[in-house]
Image: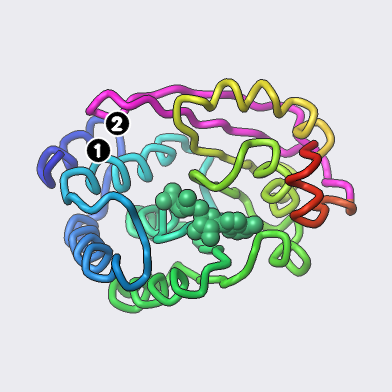
Amino acid sequence: MNRDEFLVKTAGIGIDLPAEAPEKLAVYMDLLIRRNQEFNLTAITDPEEIYEKHFYDSLYPLTDPRISGTVADVGTGAGFPGVVFAIARSDLKVILIDPTAKRCRFLEEIRKELKLNNVTVVNQRAEEYVKTKREQADVVIARAVASLPVLAELCVPLVRPGGYFISMKGTKGLEEYQQTEHAFQVLGIEHSEIREYTLPSGDGRTIITAEKTRITPGKYPRNYGQIKKKPL
Ligand code: SAM
């Protein structure tokens, strides 16, 4: 999808981008492609694919009006979906979390270049970050970071009661969702739902949205070795 098609499709799903967003996305793409070799940012380097698989896909969750306030993007990598959220919605306070120092340097460069005053870059693992920021985010989102039970244990402790954990998945989303019922219960989630959608080229995607109703017991998240070895 080229830039014009991207803008038409985005409007088609009800996302109203600010006037400066198309130019900011173009600058973001340019830097992503230019810095890719040095920082190992993305496997997708064709501009038309970036518009569809990174930008359009990252914007899609914003069709949900429950996304508001402070949004933490766990495992943001080169900034997906967090940087795209920050460009599209200046009212959001976006926290980009990633343990890779190189990627965080790139994110800082983007933040300065695009004057994204609503972005904070945090060079930490989610399990470290939670030690000082427990139950504070309105929304925690993650795209392509870990299997859903593992991801839930990393992310849900960061969400305030009454807030949301959102996971962006490919076609295996439903299968993973079905294996996460117990983890959600333990972590303080009463209600969750899955939504399927397709990118304009036909690739399938899923979004799992979980509403946190109770405080997460203090023993979670466990250390990463335990989480991986014995997912909830
Ligand atoms: N979300 C981006 C996207 O969709 O393009 C990046 C996905 S990349 C496959 C996974 C990212 O998760 C990597 O940048 C990695 O450093 C990060 N990550 C892995 N474990 C993490 C953890 N425990 N806490 C925070 N980030 C983590």
User: Which stretch did the figure color magenta?
Assistant: 188-217
- Read off the residue under disc 1: 10
Q: Main secondary structure of the magenta part?
A: strand
Picture quadrant where residue 122 is located: bottom right
Classify mark 1: helix, strand or loop.
helix
Picture quadrant where residue 129 is located: bottom right
Instruction: Identify the residue at image location x=83%, y=50%.
Output: 220
Amino acid type shown at disc 2: Ile
**Along the horizontal axis of the image, is 137 left or right of 56?**
right
Residue 231 lies, in percent from the top left, at 77, 38
**Along the horizontal axis of the image, is 214 left or right of 114?**
right
Classify mark 2: helix, strand or loop.
loop
- Read off the residue under disc 2: 13
Amino acid type shown at disc 1: Thr
Picture quadrant where residue 189 is located: top right
Residue 147 lies, in percent from the top left, at 61, 38
Instruction: Identify the residue at image location x=27%, y=23%.
Output: 202
Image vertical order of residue 204 relative to residue 140, above or below: above
